[in-house]
Image (spheres, grey):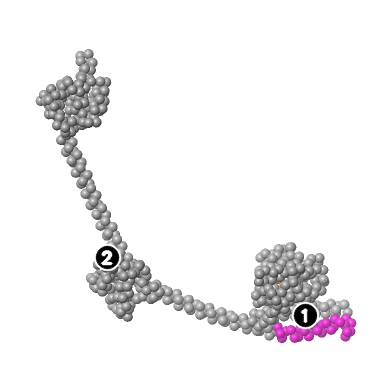
């Protein structure tokens, strides 16, 4: 025990030191006579006392403590780190009568371990710095590659106009090697004609510029080493450096785009010219057609008037009486001649309108008066069909229109209304005024019109397929003429209708306040 390097001591169960070897003196500094009889806690590093008590408690219960690292205090006050093993001492009856403690001084080992750990940490931190530096180099390389391979030429010039940065695209775009570009004046890349002003622009941009496209709205050109010019788009930005403000320029060769634009423009122009000439030709042919229609209709009317006049004379029987059969034949001749005359008149009207030959004489008109005249004109026909005609309550209003053409519109709509209404039904004319126009409505309680036909009926020669028995033939031109006449007078015409529920034809005309 005495020769052991370890401190070996005995303790009572309550912790009073009972034996102390030379090792203990070496480890803790106290001699045996200074230690024996004291409570073991006098060796505790401040704060460790409770731990000692908990060890004693374990030992009293017969447990062991092996290789436990604890901190103790040397006589000279320094810290001693020891690895302790405690075991109970039992008598011949197996009763625990004391505690044997072996404490090995591991202070030196611990110090070395801590120094090694600290060194390890420091090394790691070094390595970390290296990794960061490497990542920065990589990022820098990527950035450089990005710039080198950009589809645009990238140049930076210093305040004297010397090129300080040029990427690979700049070399291929301008035909100069990088060595030729670097340090040389940027003016060689500017066409001779624009060089004079270039330095001035560059200087004023460097002093006050913000990133922006250069020469906005202008066609810019650059010059290759071989002297050829090509169109470019340039975006410039100021870059403050230690030696003044540099200017970075991103230059795009727009030769292909400009060529494509030119091609599209010339195609557009070609098609527009073609379209215009075709339109003119179509208009000319339309005019010719309308003139032809007008003249042929006029030529047809003259003999028709003769036929109708003589048919009427014969019907009057002043030149001799007719038998029943002759009267029937004559009735057919008269009826069909009238129909043909209506058709010719309508064709003539429409041709004149389309050829621009119909001139309106617009004036302020009393709607009531015109409606009254037209209703009187239609009444014999309506009576013959037992259809009543009603003049509405709000007709006391003035409109700005051509009286003859307004009569024609109203007559067409009213005669259609009476034509497509069965006995016992009604046709009516009403009006409503809004801010600037008067809406006139010709309504009937007749046949009605399917939704899909409501716009087509305003087309030339369009008639809804089904015509009820007893309805006299029409020309299919009445509504087309009405539409043209209404629109020529600044209005619009439309219909609201449902099969079996009658129709409302509305048209608007300018409101006249005089
Ligand atoms: P039409 O001389 O045949 O009457 P319109 O141009 O005046 O020619 O009318 C075109 C077609 O519109 C008519 O044939 C008829 O089918 C339909 N139509 C016009 N007005 C009415 C109405 N009030 N009720 C029902 N159908 C109508």
Q: Which residue is pictured at 26% across the width and 56% down the height? A: 136
Q: In this view, does 223 lie to the left or right of 323?
A: left
The image position of residue 238, as x and y in percent, is 32, 67
**Mark earlier in primary sequence (2, 1):** 2
What residue would you read off at disc 1? 337
| Residue at mark 1: C-beta within 8 A of ligand 1 | no
Rendered image: mark on residue 241: 2
Decide which of 140, 300 is in the foreground and name it.
140
CA separation, marks 2 and 1? 100 Å
Whether label 2 lies within 8 Å of ligand 1 gets the answer: no
Q: Position of residue 427 (x, y in %)?
A: 77, 68
Q: Which of 189 and 343 is in front in this view?
A: 189
Return the residue nearer the eye: 202 or 373. Answer: 202
Q: Residue furthest left?
A: 3
356 left or right of 32? right
Q: Give me the residue at 75% from left, 80% from top.
A: 341
Instruction: Indicate the position of residue 497 as horizontal and vertical percent values.
Output: 70, 65
Res. 343 in view: no
Asked whether 312 falls inside the magenta stretch, the response is yes
Report the span colored magenta: 297-322
Q: Is the magenta stretch mostly helix, strand or loop?
A: helix
Picture coordinates of residue 143, whole percent (x, y): 29, 61
Circle 2 crowding by C-alpha within 10 Å: few under 14, some 14–19, many from 20: few
């Amino acid at each position: 025990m005495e020769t052991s390097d370890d401190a070996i001591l005995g303790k009572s169960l309550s912790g009073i030191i009972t034996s102390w070897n030379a090792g203990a003196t070496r480890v803790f500094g106290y001699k045996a006579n200074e230690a024996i009889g004291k409570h073991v806690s006098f060796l505790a590093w401040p704060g460790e006392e409770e731990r000692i008590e908990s060890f004693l408690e374990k030992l009293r219960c017969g447990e062991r403590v092996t290789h436990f690292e604890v901190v103790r205090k040397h006589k000279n006050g320094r810290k001693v780190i020891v690895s302790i093993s405690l075991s109970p001492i039992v008598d011949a009856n197996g009763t625990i009568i004391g505690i044997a403690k072996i404490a090995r001084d591991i202070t030196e080992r611990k110090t070395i371990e801590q120094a090694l750990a600290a060194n390890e940490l420091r090394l790691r931190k070094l390595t970390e710095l290296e990794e960061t530096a490497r990542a920065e180099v990589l990022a820098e390389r990527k950035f450089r590659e990005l710039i080198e391979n950009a589809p645009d030429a990238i140049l930076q010039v210093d305040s004297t106009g010397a090129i300080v940065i040029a990427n690979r695209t700049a070399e291929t775009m301008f035909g100069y090697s990088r060595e030729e570009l670097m340090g040389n004046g940027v003016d060689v890349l500017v066409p001779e004609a624009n060089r004079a002003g270039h330095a001035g622009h560059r200087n004023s941009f460097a002093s006050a510029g913000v990133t922006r496209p250069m020469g906005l709205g202008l066609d810019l050109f650059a010059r290759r080493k071989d002297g050829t010019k090509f169109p470019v788009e340039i975006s410039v930005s100021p870059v403050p450096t230690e030696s003044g403000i540099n200017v970075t320029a991103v230059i795009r060769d727009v030769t292909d785009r400009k060529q494509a634009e030119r091609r599209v423009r010339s195609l557009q122009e070609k098609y527009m010219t073609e379209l215009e000439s075709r339109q003119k030709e179509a208009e000319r042919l339309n005019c010719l057609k309308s003139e032809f229609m007008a003249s042929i209709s006029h030529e047809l009317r003259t003999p028709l008037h003769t036929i109708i006049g003589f048919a009427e004379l014969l019907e009057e029987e002043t030149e001799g009486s007719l038998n029943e059969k002759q009267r029937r034949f004559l009735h057919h001749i008269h009826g069909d001649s009238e129909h043909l005359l209506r058709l010719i008149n309508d064709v003539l009207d429409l041709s004149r309108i389309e050829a621009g030959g119909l001139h309106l004489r617009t004036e302020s008109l009393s709607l009531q008066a015109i409606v009254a005249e037209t209703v009187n004109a239609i009444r014999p026909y309506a009576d013959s069909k037992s259809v009543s005609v009603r003049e509405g309550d709000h007709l006391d209003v003035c409109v700005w229109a051509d009286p003859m053409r307004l009569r024609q519109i109203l007559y067409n709509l009213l005669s259609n209304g009476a034509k497509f209404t069965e006995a016992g039904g009604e046709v009516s004319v009403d009006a409503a005024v809004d801010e600037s126009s008067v809406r006139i409505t010709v309504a009937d309680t007749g046949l009605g019109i399917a939704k899909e036909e409501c716009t087509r009926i305003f087309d030339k020669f369009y008639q809804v397929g089904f015509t009820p028995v007893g309805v006299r033939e029409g020309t299919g031109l009445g509504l087309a003429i009405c539409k043209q006449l209404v629109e020529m007078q600044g209005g619009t015409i439309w219909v609201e209708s449902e099969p079996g529920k009658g129709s409302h034809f509305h048209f608007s005309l300018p409101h006249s306040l005089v």
